[in-house]
Amino acid sequence: MRIHLTGVFVDDQRKALRFYTETLGFQVKHDIPLGEHAWITVVSAEAPDGTELLLEPAAHPAVGPYRAALVEDGIPCASFAVDDVEAEYERLVARGVRFVQPPTDLGTVVTAVFDDTCGNLIQIQEEKDQP
Amino acid sequence: MDIYRAIADPTRRAILDELVDRSGQSLFELCGRLTMKHGINSSRQAISQHLGVLEAVGLIRTRREGRSKLHWFEGAPLKAIRERWPVSTDEDTSHSTDEGIEE
């Protein structure tokens, strides 16, 4: 068994697609109209056949309270792996991304958390080389 | 609860240490630091309760930034302790030791 698809709820799918591609640098995998919404997934440019991230409409009534509670406590709804958190932080800040947690060295990992502008907090994480 | 009981707990002291290290942390960030840096594996709910105690005695403040609730260390209540038992600066401190006041 493999994880091939996971998703985040987004306030506005078009805005989310722009953020996840133009700002973060992911690639569109699918963009299929589905009534008033669309089936939109993105993949990492480093792994175009890897796990897809679904940008799912936040219209379901349970999504609002669920996300509000997570964001209140600063809990990210997804975590992306990067080679260098500090470098990503600098790159994204330069593109206007707001971080709620700057790069933090936690011993075995370095993490940071930013606002995806679509209602979610996202963590980036760098595994440090073990001595 | 009074301030003495509030800082009697090692987890609450670790929370204050981490907030001194960086102001304006979310519950999530604090829990990550407590787990990874202090080996404290309490649940988020337990840490949230500790934060409630510290806020009640005025040792932390909270503020909303965007839709997140962030926490700050507030040292003012500790002034009452310094004023009650003043530390004289010209006193010979060579016999004093840090033993027992770690963590």
Image: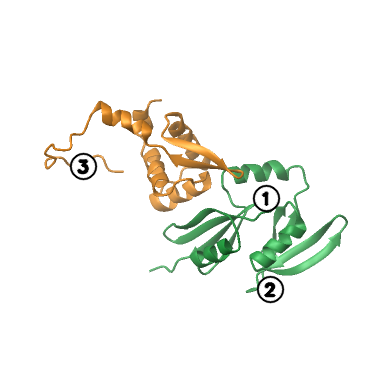
Question: If you read the primary sequence from the N terminus, does the residue marked by circle 1 or circle 2 appear first?
Answer: 2
Identified by mark 2, the residue type is Pro
Residue that numbered label 3 is attached to: B99
Chain for disc number 3: B
Chain whose colour in the figure is orange: B
Q: For this view, does A128 lie left or right of residue A4? A: left
Q: Which mark is residue A105?
A: none
Residue A87 in view of the camera: yes
The answer to whether dots 3 and 1 both sit on one chain is: no
Q: Position of residue A93 (x, y in %)?
A: 56, 61
Q: Are marks 3 and 2 in contact (CB under 8 Å)?
A: no
User: Residue shown at 45%/46% (left/top)?
Assistant: B23
The total number of labels drawn is 3
Q: Which residue is mark 2?
A: A48
* Residue located farthest toward the right when viewing the structure as drawn: A35
The quadrant holding residue B56 is: top left
Which label lies toward us, 3 or 1? 1
Distance between mark 3 and mark 2 Cα atoms: 57 Å
Amino acid type of the residue that numbered disc 1 sits on in the rendered structure = Gly
**Chain to which mark 2 belongs:** A
Instruction: Provide residue B66's location: percent of width, then percent of height.
Output: 60, 45
The secondary structure type at the circle numbered 2 is loop
From the image, state the color of chain A.
green
Q: Which residue is mark 1?
A: A119
Residue at 49% across, 34% down: B49
